[in-house]
Amino acid sequence: METKKPGYARLALMVSATSVASQLAAPTVAFAAGSDILLPKPAEFIPALIAFIIIWIIMAKMAWPAIIGVLDARQEKIESDLKGAEDAKLKAEENAKAYEERIEAANREAADIIAEAKRDAEVMRAETLAKAQEESQAIIAKAHDVIDAERAKAMSELSGSVVDLSVEIAGKIIGDALDVDEQRALANKYLAEVGSLNDD
């Protein structure tokens, strides 16, 4: 504040100097025009100068402090507005930075969710493939069992038919030398031997 008052004092001096110069210039202009009417007379000039000095002192004591106060208040308001604008700018920058950090965190979280979903999908795919392989192997094993059972059944039926046919043929060839049970036992023994040879 102290640095501003000398400036306003200089302003007051400039105003008073301008007024004095205007008063002094008026007679010069009038003198140049050749008229004595506008020339101040010493009896009028001294009271006018005293009145001007009194008015200037009154203005300096009463009006100038009010004007300076208004100007100071205006300057303080401008500085306050500038500071508020700077604070608002800093706050906006902080909000923008926080917003960017939230966006980055959301992007990281989304990437983590996607990666976890991919891992879960891979696990489910592996489990599904393993289960499908187990089921296919079980189906194949069951099919083999069914085929083996059907083969064994067919072999049993075939061997029974062969035994009956052998007994019948042997009975016709040999006659009644062997009874039916002995012929069947002999045919079964022969088929067992043939089966053991096929297995080897």
Image: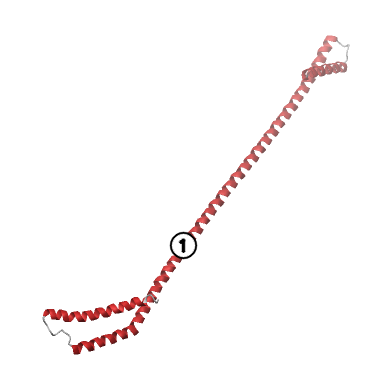
Q: In this view, does 135 lie to the left or right of 118?
A: right
Residue found 80% across the figure and 19% down from its top: 196
| Residue 74 x/y as whole percent | 38, 74
Residue found 71% across the figure and 31% down from its top: 141
Q: Quadrant of the C terminus?
A: top right
| Numbered-mark total | 1
Q: Is mark 1 on a helix, strand or loop?
A: helix
Q: Is residue 24 left or right of residue 172?
A: left
Which quarter of the figure has residue 60? bottom left
Assess disc 1: are there few (<14), some (14-19) or many (≥20) residues with their C-alpha within 10 Å of its C-alpha: few
Residue found 40% across the figure and 73% down from its top: 77
In the image, residue 148 above or below residue 64 = above
Amino acid type of disc 1? Ala
Q: Which of 90 and 159 is in front in this view?
A: 90
Which quarter of the figure has residue 137? top right
Which quarter of the figure has residue 84? bottom left
Residue found 43% across the figure and 68% down from its top: 83
Q: Name the residue under label 1.
A: 92
| Residue 34 x/y as whole percent | 11, 81
In the image, residue 45 above or below residue 137 = below
Q: In this view, does 151 lie to the left or right of 117?
A: right
